[in-house]
Every structure is written in structure tokens, then in C-alpha cells.
Image (cartoon, helix red, strand yellow):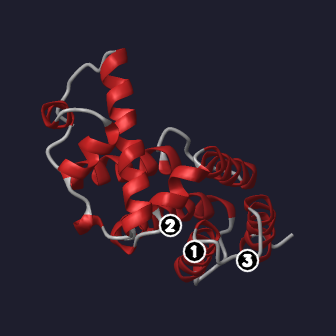
Amino acid sequence: MKVQGLNSSSKKTRKLIKKTFAELINEKKDLNKITVTELVKRADITRGTFYTHYDDIYDVANEYQLETIELLISDDNVLYTKEDVINYFSDVFKCLKKNEDTYRMLLSSDDLLFFLEKLKKMSSRKLLFALNNICKDNDFIELDVSFFINGLVNEILSYFRDKSDYSLEELFDNCKKWFNKIFIYD
């Protein structure tokens, strides 16, 4: 991130650059096919303006990844109870819904999927911490968390690629059901 202490104008410019980037990745499906020249022309900004904010196209992609991970995996909310976990998943799905158009564009390309691996690992760690407090008698907790998170992320990816028959709301409802069936033994 090049610009320090973003003012209102800088925030708008970065938002425009990221929006244009998302449109281009959606169209081209390949990060390597997007050029700074093409992006600045479409965004109607100068190259200098782009380079004031980003080093290159990969820097824009990286910022999207970091923002997404921060939104979805913030360490601010530690999970201790079943309700904490359900509220966490509720917040994640709200974030996905709020930014649906952007995620749909970004996840149309396989180039940006490597960040999903980071997301899975971070989500798994967060959930595992909570579950170690919630359910003590599970010798396969790490495996169960892996199946749960991988399945959930795969379903969300299918949704954003229009390959799912379910809405985000239905996925969230089923997420709660799966969580209870796998981890809560009441």
C-alpha cells in the first residue's frame, strides 16, 4: 500500500481502481491478461495516479485478498461459545452478501483462488480454537474442521460462480445445521 494516510480523494481513487480491476478480472478470467494501461484507460485516470496508489496489478489483487481476509477472519472477535461461532458465520455471510457483486467478479478467475487457501487455513484455526472450548471429546476435531471449512468454502465458491442451486441465505442456514450436526452433540 503506497499512499499513507488516505484522504477522501485517495479513498475514492483506490475504490475506482479496485472496481475497475474487478470488472477486468471478471471479463478476462486471467490476471496475467490485465495491464495497467488497460485499467487506467477504463478507469479514466493517469498512469501516475495508478502508481501513486499501487505498484502493479498484482498489488491491487493482493489488497483485495487482504481486505477480504480482514473482513472475514478478523481476530477481534474470539469465539468461545456455540453462539459466538454462529454469530461469526452470520457476519461472514452478511459480508459476502454485501459485497456479492465484487466477489462474483473476483472469484470468476482461477488466478485469485490461492487466497482461498489462506482463508481456509485462517478460518480453520479460528474455528478449531472455539471448538477446543466447546466440544472436548472429539479425537478427530482437526479433520472435522477441515471437512467443514473446505466444504463450506467450496459451496460458497460454487455460488459465486453460478454453479449452485442455493442462495447465500440457504447456504448459511445449512452451515448452521452442518455445524450443529458435526460439532454439537446435544
Residue 145: mark in rendering: 1
Residue 164: quadrant of the picture: bottom right
Three-letter amino acid code at the position of disc 1: Val
* Residue 81 position within the rendered picture, expressed as x and y whole percent measured from the top left: 70, 51
* Residue reaching furthest to the right: 186
Gap in Å between the C-alphas at discs 3 and 1? 9 Å
x and y, in percent, of residue 136 in the image: 65, 70
Upstream in the sequence, badge 1 or badge 2? 2
**Does residue 126 appear anywhere in the picture?**
no
Dot label at residue 133: none
The structure residue drawn at horizontal position 19% and vertical position 49%, both measured from the top left corner, is 36
Label 3: which secondary element: helix
Q: Which residue bears the numbered disc 3?
A: 182
Q: Mark 3 or mark 1, which has the lower sequence index? A: 1
Element type where label 2 sits in the image: helix
First in sequence: mark 2 vs mark 3: 2
Left or right, residue 82 beside residue 124: right
Say which of 172 and 84 sits in front. 172
Q: Classify the position of the N terminus by image quarter.
A: top left
CA gap between label 1 and label 2 equals 6 Å
- Whole-angstrom CA distance, mark 2 to mark 3, is 14 Å
Task: Tell me residue 158's x, y (percent).
Answer: 61, 75
Q: Quadrant of the C terminus?
A: bottom right
Q: Is residue 15 visible?
A: yes
- Horizontal side of 85 relative to 165 (left or right) equals left
Label 2, residues with CA under 10 Å away: few <14, some 14-19, many ≥20? many
Residue for badge 2: 124
Viewer-nearest residue: 41 or 146: 41
Question: Where residue 115 sits: x, y (%)?
Answer: 37, 64
Q: Is residue 51 above or below residue 108?
A: above
Q: Is residue 179 above or below residue 60?
A: below
The answer to whether mark 1 and mark 2 are in CB contact below 8 A is yes
